[in-house]
Image (tube, rainbow, N blue to C red):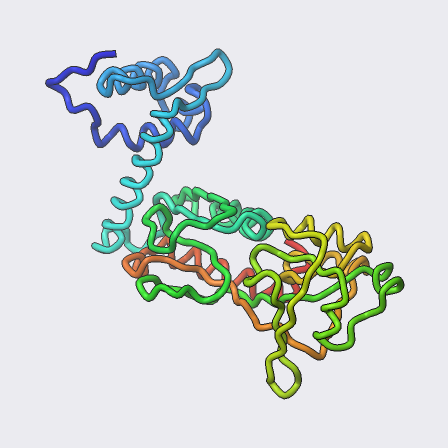
Amino acid sequence: MAANPATPAIQPADLGFFSTLASSGSLSAAARELGVTTPAVSKRLAQMEARVGIALVNRSTRRMSLTPEGELYLEHARRILGEIDGMAELLGLSRAVPQGLLRVNATLGFGRSHVAPLISRFARKHPRVEVQLQLSVNPPPLTDDAFDVCIRFGPPPDARVIARRIAPNRRLLCAAPAYLAAHGAPQIPEDLEKHNCFTYEYVTPRNVWRFRDASGAERAVRVAGTLHSNNGDLLAEVAARGAGITFEPAFIVGPEVRAGRLVPLLQDFTPPPVPIYAVYPSRKHLSAKVRRFVEFLIARYAQAQDWSSP
């Protein structure tokens, strides 16, 4: 493909068109969304590709997919569209109506279980907002401009961002009844040194577990075990089979505890809390879509203190 040097390779109107096309999943679906014919969508896409000189979409009879260049184009198009929406909100042009692209990042386990189920509810309540949710094993830097809101555990150390506490996050030490029958239950934190303790990637440092006793004094115990993972559901499942002791957030082990497959331990000793925060750049604090989304999460999570269900 050869671009026409007299025509800008990328035109502003192309950004919204391509974002809609990518979200629709097919030319015909995009045509319905845009209120035009499928040939019109195909023609406009062909014109875009001719101007940039590369293929952006792989076409087939039933579905389409983006080329690597198309993925890159989409990423930058959505970022630019988000900045335009943010500018309109900051200037008061949006009349405080949440609208535009909202880019959300969350950790893999919590995002899948407790953020993703709320996205459709938020979207129904605010139909002018398009939510893009990315789940990460290794969350991006808080100062990265790739997202409007990031869901994080514990207060962020970076003063350049705003952090709003959206929910408590108790951690539970627990084991299966079968394990306790075979090995006995620890009575004090130091007893854990004699047990098979599964370690979770997001409890840092992973082999030092901390508790506070009734007087407020901290008790730090070095533990060891046969299993370490960044997948909390996996650790809870193996522990429920009677293989060891796990120390994880209540939103992961809550269902197992309620079902009786895991039993809480050392309840007279309190692990340090690691609350859940919504984090966003300070320049986003006037954004209606960010503000409404964070308030939506706070209201919903206030009803889920034990995290026993999504």
Pinpoint residue 309: horizontal percent, then vertical percent: 67, 56
In the image, is 95 to the left or to the right of 275? left
Query: Where the N terminus falls, by quadrant?
Result: top left
Q: Residue furthest right?
A: 181
- Front residue of 63/197: it is 197
In the image, is 150 to the left or to the right of 266? left
Which residue sits at x=36%, y=13%?
A: 39
Pinpoint residue 178: horizontal percent, then vertical percent: 87, 59
- Front residue of 175/169: it is 175
Pinpoint residue 287: horizontal percent, then vertical percent: 32, 56
Write down the quadrant of residue 84 in the picture: top left
Which residue sits at x=41%, y=49%?
A: 140
Residue 257 to residue 217: above or below: above
Write down the quadrant of residue 49 in the picture: top left
Residue 142 to residue 120: above or below: below
Which residue sits at x=39%, y=47%?
A: 102
Q: Residue furthest bottom?
A: 215
- Front residue of 28/137: it is 137
